[in-house]
Amino acid sequence: MISNILVLLLVFLSTLFALLFIHKERKSFAKRAARHVTAKQAVHTVPTPRVGGIAIAVGVLSGALLSGDDLFGTLLWTTLPIFVIGLLEDLGPDTPPSLRLGVSALSAILAILVLNMHIMRVDLPGVDSLISITLIGMAFTIFASTGMTHAINLIDGLNGLSSAVVIAIMISFGMVAHRYGHADLVVMNAVVCIAFIGFMCVNFPHGRVFLGDAGAYSIGHIIAWNAIILLNREPDISAWGILLVLLWPVVDTLFAMVRRMVTRLPVSRPDKLHYHHLLMRLVLLMTHKTIGKKEANPIGSLLSWPLIAVPCIVGYHLIDNTRWALTASVAFTLAYVITYHLLIHNAFKLRKSRKV
């Protein structure tokens, strides 16, 4: 068997070479990419290939094949439906949000069946009694898996942002898996992490290739089932410790849903009011727009990285402590909401002062 270090090196190189090939052939994707520049949530100004998910797939599949890990290979098979529907969105005509939601649920159902597991606890009295009922537990698992699948896509808004989220989560879960002696999960997390480091080399800071829906949906599915597998294997692991590791995409997605419902907009409607959008806008206003979106984009992403990393670090250290992990989850969520409103207030104040 090839050594793990060599496997990871090959994963990195295969991902990077695939990305460089995509960048070289970017004119082939120009027509489709140009349409996304005008999208409501877009913050980039140049048509850019959105098929980074293909390169991620090349790297991750290489790692799965070379490592010979059965769990990894099985999980990747369940990712296929959501990868395909995401790729259709990246390359072809628009697909309805309801169709993408349904296909992500299909991937979750496949994972339940082939892995023979689902969420059976969330470490809340009363709720656990309900989830322990098989059908309810399976339904909740489909909901959670589908939610995480779409959460990664929603936070994929600035250069390097989705990569930072994925890398932080994979390192945290990999360390948890190592602590509890699950070598197969360590390898899986390492492979995905290295593939995204390769992706970041091309995506950050200039955004030469974007992750796209295929990449975001697929990695969201893998992250969700990484968490579910850990919860099923280790009774000592707290569901709230897992949530802490996943806090940024979870809270950002839930907050976006609440925000749109309050403003009576469709929940699936994209906007430029995510936390990272506000950071980028604040950078533009604080610099009196002496820099453009091209420069503010990676700066906004960089400012987000510590906010993403801290809950992951705390989650790792509290992975077996439900009480403190729950407390930390609530505290970080409140911090998110408070600082979000501060960003809105400061951006409005700066914009108003510029007009005086």
Image (cartoon, helix red, strand yellow):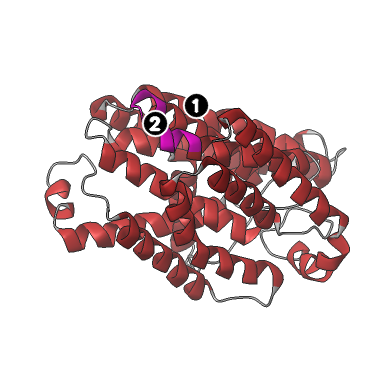
- Say what amino acid the circle numbered 1 marks: Val
Residue at x-position 34% and y-position 59%: 114
Give the quadrant of residue 104.
bottom left
Look at the picture and state if 304 lies above or below 249.
above
- Say what amino acid the circle numbered 2 marks: Ala
Residue 2 colored magenta? no
Residue 332, horizontal then vertical, whole percent: 42, 32
Residue 297, horizontal then vertical, whole percent: 75, 42
Determine crowd level at label 2: few under 14, some 14-19, many 20+ residues with C-alpha closer than 10 A: many
Give the label on residue 261, or none: none
Residue 181 colored magenta? yes
Residue 23 horizontal side relative to residue 236, left or right: right
- Of the 4 image quadrants, the one containing the C terminus is top right
Give the label on residue 310, or none: 1
| Residue ID for mark 2 | 177
What segment is highlighted magenta in the picture? 177-187
From the viewer's side, name the closer residue of 188 and 231. 188
From the viewer's side, name the closer residue of 288 and 145. 145
Residue at x-position 28% and y-position 58%: 140
Look at the picture and state if 230 lies above or below 310.
below
Residue 49, horizontal then vertical, whole percent: 77, 59
